[in-house]
Amino acid sequence: MAKKKSRTAGSTPAIVALEAAGIPFEVLEYDHDPRSTLNFGMEAATALGRDPASVFKTLMVMADSSLSVGIVPVGGHLDLKALAQALGAKRAVMADQALAQRATGYVVGGISPLGQKTRHATVLDASALTHATVLVSGGRRGLDIELAPQDLAQLTAAVVAPIARA
């Protein structure tokens, strides 16, 4: 069952970044099933009763030799060629999970595009702009943040491009 969460209790770097920027957002918490090891985003969409098209997952990739971020709807897949093109890179591959965790400060399944230890080049799928608000990970499994997609793009300095595929 989903519930709104106090912004100060259990704060994450993502929440701290949003508060520091003065961006309006809501924190939503749900009971994460620790047996779930795949498709954390769909788990969030289901638990929060949201359309999967408005819930986005954060994927870490290596674009040429740089760690980068792709943000796409949880019901779709990241088009690595489209992401590379959006970043002006020759190619992109999924990043090693251990590297992604070290570079972001978050665990897989809870990687937020916000408040990462190091800022990375970010591409937000253009479909995000068709929603009044979107959900992204709040920095741990079972915690999502709802905010305007324009604010997400601004705070992450994201390029907005069509990078998702069905």
Image (spheres, grey):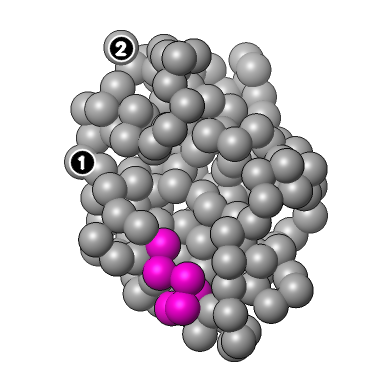
Does the segment drawn in magenta span residue 127? no
- Under circle 2, the secondary element is loop
Q: Amino acid at mark 2?
A: Met
Task: Give the vertical position of 65 relative to 11 (above or below).
Answer: below
Q: Amino acid at mark 1?
A: Asp
Magenta segment: 78-83
In the rendered structure, the answer to whether residue 60 lies left or right of residue 80 reads right
Q: Position of residue 53 (x, y in %)?
A: 25, 50
Badge number at residue 1: 2
Q: Position of residue 16 (x, y in %)?
A: 68, 36
Q: Residue at x 64, y 73 (%)?
A: 63
In space, the residues marked 1 and 2 are separated at their CA atoms by: 16 Å
- Under circle 1, the secondary element is loop
Which quadrant is the N terminus positioned in?
top left
Look at mark 1 in the image and give the residue it sits on: 51
Q: Residue at x 41, y 62 (%)?
A: 78
